[in-house]
Amino acid sequence: MMNPDEIKIRDIKPLLDVPDHSLYLFIGVVLLSLVLLGGLAYLAVKWIKAKNRLNLRKTMYQKLLHVDLSDSKKAAYEITKYGLYFKDDSPRNEEMYLNLISRLERYKYKKEVGAFEYEERSYFELYKGMIDV
């Protein structure tokens, strides 16, 4: 038998560094996914707000159409509240709204008020006709 000191052993080479980019690739994929998900979330929120805005316009228009003109004081406040929502549609709507509000001032801030006159009713009907929903 051979003596262990006499056995010729070939040198064992040291471990080599293997380049590993998998961590960087993983971080890149995660960041790209987060950016895409953030963009999709932004678009979804924007779409939902636009959809709700249209529904709010329809709701306000329906409330404006169904204002009870028999109680002129309450109706003046409701017309002011609901009509304000459509004021910024066009310069013509804004001018008409301000004119209507100035005519309704005498029905507000008083304890007892009379019924709407023909002129106020016609201005209100004209303003309702100008609104596009």
Image: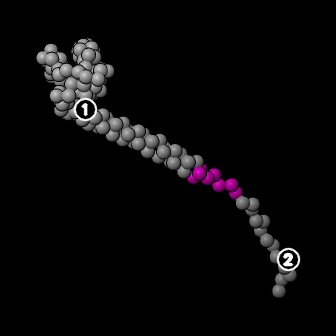
| Residue at the farthest front position | 112
Q: CA distance from mark 2 to mark 1?
A: 101 Å
Which amino acid does the dot numbered 1 rest on? Answer: Met
Q: Which residues are magenta?
A: 16-23
- Residue pictured at 70% horizontal, 57% vertical: 16
Residue 88 % position (x, y): 30, 20
Residue 28 % position (x, y): 53, 45
The N terminus lies in quadrant: bottom right
- Residue pictured at 15% horizontal, 15% vertical: 119
Instruction: Judge whether residue 130 can be spotted in this image.
Output: no
Which residue is label 1 attached to? Answer: 60
The reply, left or right, for residue 34 in relation to residue 51 is right
Which residue is label 2 attached to? Answer: 6
Quadrant position of residue 57 = top left
Badge 1 marks a residue whose secondary structure is helix
Quadrant position of residue 55 = top left
